[in-house]
Image: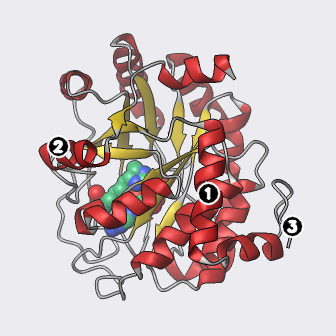
Amino acid sequence: MIIPYSGWTKKSAQAVHDLPLMDLLFRAQTVHRKHFDPNKIQTSKLLSIKTGGCAEDCAYCSQSARNGSTLPASKLIEVQRVLTEAKKAKDGGATRFCMGAAWREPKARDMAALVAMVEGVKAMGMETCMTLGMLDDTQVVQLRDAGLDYYNHNIDTSERYYSEVITTRTFADRIDTMNRVQEAGIKVCSGGILGMGEHTGDRIDMLLTLANMQPAPDSVPINMLMPQADTPLADAEPIDPIDFVRIIATARILMPTSYVRLSAGRSEMSDEMQAMCFFAGANSIFVGETLLTAENPEEDTDMVLFAKLGLQAEKAGDQAGREAAE
Ligand code: SAM
Ligand code: DTB
Ligand code: SF4
């Protein structure tokens, strides 16, 4: 069967996903090598700039005030603290600094501090990313003018399954903010979570929504659910590792030039599972021992893994040089 490279439909994406695993991996790796150095992995560092007490009811999240989670709510942290953490991340080799806030949306009174954070991190020579919930037209322009490179806003799952996971906002609300961000000229980072009780068809629909955006997001984080105590998904059935790898490979084939980030859940994955994900086309990770609230592998552990696999952390400008040479 000839499977097209663009104009993905449910049928063609499902056919890719269902290929014999060796064919799927070979095809994903072939696509990957056309656009990226297969031995380089982009590294991002996350910082929670406002933790807990969130008004939304995302069933997976430790930070929702509606989930009965006991995590205390903090205020937006000081700009100087953010800059100190960004400097540490840069010294540790990360090229992108992602700042996350547990908000439904930022308030007007928070914007000056957010702008100062973006300007300060940018001035250090790092790429900037924020994830703050929904944004209005004024806010996207303020963040863009401050120098924000990426905005993370996950669609999390399929449109069909969305209301099973979140009821305080809709899938369409999510797409609206992504469109606003893209129209302002900020790069979109959007992906989702696997292992929330969704069907394979939901995972494929999620990838199709992303792949059929014009253009597809520059960065696609694929998270494996990290079950959080006291949340509705605390006892969710873990996803089969091979099913997870299939989605990474399908994402790579559907979105050949996007960075596919192996995001939350790496602390629960074996070296072999991570190696398969990298072979399937994942080429970005979060580094450092904490994500926002949950754990991530220690930096030393990742260094050992990279050495074993012969992988190198991408340096600032690596991919830009490669694109110019193509
Ligand atoms: N409040 C903002 C929002 O929802 O867009 C930003 C922060 S939110 C924590 C960012 C993303 O992290 C979520 O969209 C979800 O995909 C991921 N995430 C949150 N909790 C998770 C968990 N327990 N396991 C895996 N991924 C998770
Ligand atoms: C994304 O897709 N994953 C990151 C980032 N975007 C903001 C967040 C993962 C959060 C994992 C759970 C926690 O740390 O609380
Ligand atoms: Fe709030 Fe984001 Fe957590 Fe949802 S995922 S509860 S919006 S912090």
Q: Residue 213 versus residue 153: which sits nearer the camera?
A: 213
Which disc is residue 28 wearing? 1
Q: Residue 79 versus residue 4: which sits nearer the camera?
A: 4
Q: Secondary structure at mark 1?
A: helix
Kind of residue at disc 3: Ile
Kind of residue at disc 2: Glu
Residue annotated with mark 2: 299
Q: Of the two numbered discs 3 and 1 on the same chain, state the one appearing first in sequence.
A: 3
Q: Residue shown at 48%/22% (left/top)?
A: 318
Say whether mark 1 is within 8 Å of ligand 2: no
| Nearest to viewer (mark 2 / mark 3) | 3
- Mark 3 burial class by Cα count in 10 Å: few <14, some 14-19, many 20+: few
Q: CA distance from mark 2 to mark 3?
A: 42 Å
Say whether mark 2 is within 8 Å of ligand 2: no
From what the image shows, is residue 88 above or below residue 312? above
| Nearest to viewer (mark 1 / mark 2) | 1
- Mark 1 burial class by Cα count in 10 Å: few <14, some 14-19, many 20+: many
Q: In the rendering, at what x and y percent does residue 113 appear?
A: 35, 25
From what the image shows, is residue 156 above or below residue 283? below
Q: Is residue 126 left or right of residue 280?
A: left
Kind of residue at disc 1: Ala
Q: Residue furthest top?
A: 123
What is the image's colouring?
secondary structure
* Quadrant of residue 326 within the rendered picture: top right
Q: Quadrant of ligand 2?
A: bottom left
Residue annotated with mark 3: 2
